[in-house]
Image: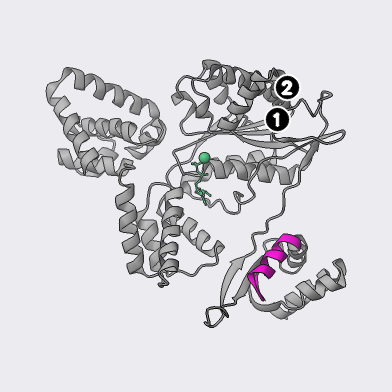
Amino acid sequence: MGKTAESVWKNCLNFVKDNIQEQAFKTWFSPIQPIKLNENILTIQVPSKFFYEWLEEHYIKLLKIALQKELGKDAKLVYSIVMDQKYSGKDPYTVKIPSSNREKLQLQEVDAPLPIDSKKVKNPFIIPGLQKIKIDSQLNTNNNFHNFIEGETNRLARSAGKAVAKRPGGTSFNPLFIYGGVGLGKTHLAHAIGLEAKENHPDKTVLYVSTEKFTQQFIDSVQSNNRNDFIHFYQMIDILIIDDVQFLSGKKATQEAFFHIFNHLHQKGNQIILTSDKPPVDIQDMEQRLISRFKWGLSADLQAPDYETRLAILKHKVEKDGLEMPEEVVDHIAKNIKTNVRELEGCLNSIIAQATLNKKEITLELTQKTLSNFINNTRKEISIDYIQRLVCDYFKIPVDQIQSKTRKRDVVQARQLAMFFAKKYTKASLSSIGSQIGNRDHATVLHACKTVKNLSETDKIFRGYVEDINRKITIE
Ligand code: ADP
Ligand code: MG
């Protein structure tokens, strides 16, 4: 006999009823109507947004267990909310919002290895307790693996992250060094690893910290003569995640402290996860002994998402926000916004805002209009793709030539110029530039940059090319 929304919901209710107070059950569960069952997705109708928030806040764990008993591990819940418009005199309408399955993260207790005097510990992550100190892992539950869409361009980093979350400190990926340009998902992935590691290993302490915060804490600790406490605190962490380590560049004393922390943790077999906007070799003003340690484990890069991934990310976001959007609209955005995920989200949000503010339907026309503003405004953020096209245009050679293996002189020159300008005008790392321009490695890009620089100092005609192209990039 097939399951129906009613039968599934009835069994869920029986389970819920046994686990909560009768009054609460009456208040919060009797008014709910099951409306649709689509494979493992159950849609229930709730009377208001407040109702939905209350359920998510107080009963989501219970609902999750009940639903998984009925529909298996991948069970999903979608709320259909009746939006009351009695004040505006319009008919009520409904919106659909999937359950976020969010659970409050628990604080973790650890035994302090030293009799830490809680008054003396200035670390903001420590909440003074009686015998134990509690650590707030600083993880954002919205940045989980479920929300992190897999694609060709993030597969390695994502699966390495998964492996680390499963066996923190137990793989050869220590440290796990994730790098890539802005808005490509480094921070999101770092949180996702922390969250999953915490779920898999509730006894381990996880801490996420940005390099800026880390540096500030270090400076404060030095000023208040607590440098050792600072270092000891970080040496207690089982899984340490430091975001944007490129900001350690030029900060000698902080690098030194980090070096001690790193060594201690690594020796103990604790997991270290680092992110950066460039690969270790390209980080300037960083002590060599740190750079070499960054390379001990695995370096995995995140690249600009391809069309399929962009489409999947957009679809996921539309669904998550309970929106309905024509297929052609989503497709149009995915085809046109290519730089990074943050921009993709920004664009989607501005279309939604346009539609909401002007009470218009989301159509292809509205999207095209919004997008043209978006693309013009962001043109200043020059893409590698754009640079390649411009350089090829200038020398009148087809773009697929510089993407090919050919070593013809004029093509090599165009390729080197494209690499040089990509380094100059984008934030992409050398290896990411190389992989986008003819699938070369970072050393080739570095060599190209040097060659262009040398030639423009010695060869007048060549300098003319560089100046022309530079003008075109900055003006057009
Ligand atoms: P970075 O730290 O590399 O600058 P973020 O992690 O802040 O980038 O990501 C920018 C935005 O894009 C965030 O809102 C993030 O949730 C989203 N995002 C990035 N990658 C993905 C992905 N693979 N799937 C879904 N959302 C993503
Ligand atoms: Mg970031």
Q: CA distance from mark 1 to mark 2?
A: 9 Å
The residue identified by callout 1 is 123
In contact (CB < 8 Å): disc 1 and disc 2:
yes
Q: Say which quarter of the image contains residue 132.
A: top right
Q: Residue drawn at (58%, 70%), measured in percent from left and top?
A: 96
Q: Say which quarter of the image contains residue 332.
A: bottom left
The chosen color scheme is: one colour
Tell whether 476 sits left or right of 357.
Answer: left
Q: Amino acid at mark 2?
A: Asp
The label on residue 229 is 2
Q: Quadrant of the C terminus?
A: top left
Q: Which residues are magenta?
A: 40-58
Q: Residue drawn at (30%, 32%), measured in percent from left and top?
A: 419
Q: Local crowd at mark 2 within 10 Å, few (<14), some, or many (≥20)? A: some
Q: Residue drawn at (53%, 52%), measured in percent from left and top?
A: 149
Q: Residue 344, how many percent across, how many down? A: 43, 53
Q: Local crowd at mark 1 within 10 Å, few (<14), some, or many (≥20)? A: some
Q: Please, which residue is most extreme toward the front here?
A: 87
